Amino acid sequence: MAEIVIVRDEQEAGGLIADAIVALITGKPDAVLGLATGSTPLATYRALAERIGERRIDVRGVRGFALDEYVGLPAGHPESYRAVITREVVEPLGLTPELVRVPNGDPTGIEHAGRDYEAAITAAGGVDLQILGIGRTGHIGFNEPGSSLASLTRVKTLTAPTRADNARFFDSPDDVPMHCITQGIGTILRARHLVLLAFGEAKAPAVAAAVEGPVSASQPGSAIQLHPHATVVVDEAAASRL
Ligand code: GLP
């Protein structure tokens, strides 16, 4: 059973997780962070940037792996997850850009991209702390319902609800890519500590299915129940169906 922490709001969650990450980095200056995109972890990244600045923590050796990327966006597109991770994480935290990887969503060579990413994570010694959001469909990373619980990094097709949810970041819903490359559920489960965050009523069904439902590929978030060290940090609204 995952450890459940109910917080007042995203800011309190961000502070708690930032403290855990600071403790990790202090003990292991080349710690490997698993980075999520989406709006959910933004307060965590802000809190972490504050602590790093105030306490002058040396993060030059910290490494990072993003969960996922769209396939086929032009290089430098502001909503590519490479751009988002640079803007929201690498720059505010002062991480070393070369040490933070994002799956390669360039269609050229995409057939090798999953294998290469897995090899890079393994070569880094695995992820120490993986930050996770959860989609309304129950997806973690971009592992939509039906994803194998043993899956590794690969190309997937986005579902219509996920494309609709992410349309807010694009000029038109038609601009949301059809495909993505995402760490698999098996990849995510190899991280040493999972921290799943969710806020707001809309996430309540996905949180309940992840925490209390049967472990099933139809609810990818439920895979956290297979992990020996998973922490779920939610506000009252996201916890309302537990
Ligand atoms: C996105 C990302 C996920 C994220 C989820 C929730 O599409 N690929 O990694 O956890 O959907 O997004 P948000 O945090 O904006 O609700």
Image (spheres, rainbow, N blue to C red):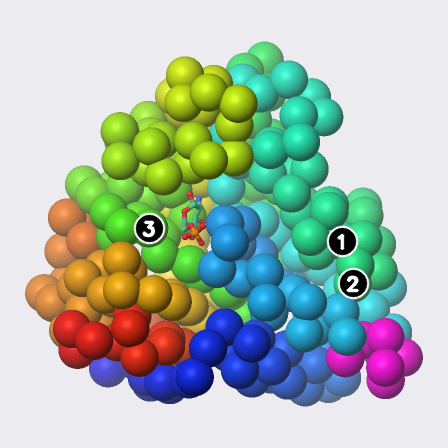
Mark 3 or mark 1: whose residue is earlier in sequence: 1
Distance from Cα at disc 3 to Cα at disc 1: 24 Å
Distance from Cα at disc 1 to Cα at disc 2: 6 Å
Please identify the quarter of the rendering in which residue 225 is found.
Answer: bottom left
Mark 3 or mark 2: whose residue is earlier in sequence: 2
Tag 1: amino acid:
Val
Q: Determine whether, in the image, residue 66 is placed left or right of residue 207.
A: right
Q: How crowded is mark 2: few (under 14 residues within 10 Å), some or many (20 or more)?
A: many
**What residue is shown with label 2?**
93
Disc 3 vs disc 1: which is toward the camera?
A: 3
Distance from Cα at disc 3 to Cα at disc 2: 25 Å
Q: Is mark 3 within 8 Å of ligand 1?
A: yes
* Residue extent of the magenta highlight: 51-57
- The one nearer the camera, 183 or 172, is 172
* Residue visible at 81% across and 53% down in the picture: 91
On-image quarter of the N terminus: bottom left
- Find residue 90 and name its label: 1
Tag 2: amino acid:
Leu
**What residue is shown with label 3?**
135
Task: Say above or below: 37 vs 231.
Answer: above
* Residue visible at 65% across and 65% down in the picture: 45
